Amino acid sequence: MAIRGNGGSRSPLRPAQARSLRLRGTRLSGPQGNPMTLGMSLGLAAAAIVLAAAFVTSETSITRQAKADRVTVVYWEKWTGSEGEEMAKVVSAFNRSQDRIFVKILSISGVDQKTMLATAGGNPPDVAGLWGNNVTQLADANAVTDLTELARAAGVTEDQYIPGYWDGLTYHGKLWALPSTPASMAMHVNADLVPKEFATAETFPQTFKALDALVDKISKKDKAGTLTMTGFLPGEPGWWHWAWGYWFGGRLIEGDRLTINAPENVRALEWIAGYGKRFGVSQMQSFQSGFGNFASPQDAFMTGKVASQLHGVYKANYIRLYKSDLNWFALPFPHPDDRPDLAGQTIIDQDVLMIPRGAKHPKEAFEFIRFVQRQDVMEGLCAAHGKNSPLMAVSEGFLKDHPNKEIRLFDRLARDPKAFHTPKIGIFNQISSEMSVAYQEVSGGQKSAKQALDDAQSRLEGLWRIYQDQVLKP
């Protein structure tokens, strides 16, 4: 049974509902990750609402009159830098393609929270560029427009999209978003740091047991016993701690029931714990503290501090920019020895375009979103971002000329029925935070995998009950 939300007609999002999504019953963190009390967080939220309201008022007041002879569609996007520039090119192309609508793109920090607050205040943008894991939360909060009928009228259909991506756009049988750019994940390997017999996608370890054996063989310490290179580290880059159990066949929800401490998830964190035992917790933590930002020349993979790394299709962008001579390849992330059925799994994710509830020009906004879905437009944007396409139809030119030499792998992984995305539940952000806490507790030797996940399950069950009572019920 799917997780139930409110059905039928629903009233617009109220500020209290917006706060409940992030604050009620949530284990929040302040500076240095210290837990915050609910009272503290509510105080901060109130201040944030005042500031955001001022921001929203000022932003919309200067952008609604962009073109007197056209309907102005205000588009808030999270991207900055080259990614933002490429999306701005798409916007310009749309504006040139017709003479009725003018899309004004604005780069907005904290776009998810500001979109929620603007919607609660009755003055949202017409289009919001958000993350895939925002879909369920915003749908539960009645903060986003149902696109089902708009898509049907425009000829946008499920069969045009890779199934896993389309699934992430839908909730309770309705369509809430369409993609801008997607991603899939794979193991990246520095071929110069592994023995020649493992230096191809065909010969590199395919299972966790074989990977661990290789890590034991090639990891290095200096004369003082300090780690200088590891074959693999689960915490690098450490962006998907919620997903460890999935690689072992686990899930975080089953219908409307949380399964945080499922045996497969426990097994995954027991494997994680092995790395702290292998290298020593303090040694491992000290080693990781010296890693640079992934979008820099000091990235641990590009500087040769880790020989292999789970990362997204976009990793090649940074390799090309900061270490173009790196001898690397990619392959599917490993699977357990006793679960060959899990071979070829990947995490899929996507940036999405949504129309907030109460948008001034939803039909015109959807016309722009539909333009982005054109195969030529989508392939141009995805190639510029170094990503795969979410569309079922893909041109040979896109694959042949793509800046990522491994794009065919990432495209194939995304199409595999085993590909998985964030669970469709409104408290995913809190689940993700708790899984990160559990990861730190287990990798740091503070708790067993079973205890850490039992504790997370207990905390999240309480939060889930509150969410069901205060958000999902009228």
Image (cartoon, rainbow, N blue to C red):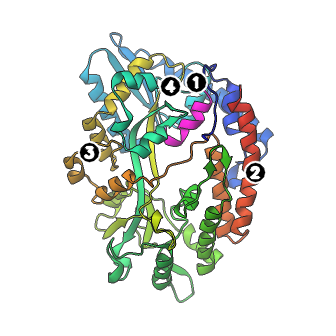
Q: Could you tell me if residue 47 is visible in this image?
A: no
**Can you tell which of label 2 and label 1 is closer to the viewer?**
2
Find disc 1 in the rendering and name its residue. 119
Q: CA distance from mark 3 to mark 4?
A: 27 Å
- Percent across and percent down for residue 113 are 59, 34
Vertical comparison of 141 with 233: above or below: above
Toward the front, the furthest residue is 1
- Where residue 89 sits in the image (x, y, percent)? 30, 34
Query: Toward the viewer: 173 or 131?
Result: 173
- Secondary structure of the magenta portion, mostly? helix
Does the residue at mark 2 contact the one at mark 1 (Cβ under 8 Å)? no
Region in magenta: 131-143
Tag of residue 146:
4
Q: Which image quadrant is residue 192 in?
A: bottom left
Q: In the image, what residue type sits under mark 2?
A: Arg
> Which mark identifies residue 394?
3
Whole-angstrom CA distance, mark 3 to mark 2, is 44 Å
> At x 74% / y 32%, what residue is drawn?
470
**Quadrant of residue 181 in the image?**
top left
Element on which disc 4 rests = loop
Left or right relative to 113: residue 394: left
Q: Is residue 153 visible?
A: yes
The residue at which mark 2 appears reads as 459
- Is there a contact, CB below 8 Å, between mark 2 and mark 4? no
Instruction: Look at label 1 and name its amino acid.
Output: Thr
* Spatial separation of the CA atoms under disc 2 and disc 4: 32 Å
Q: Earlier in the sequence, mark 2 or mark 4?
A: 4
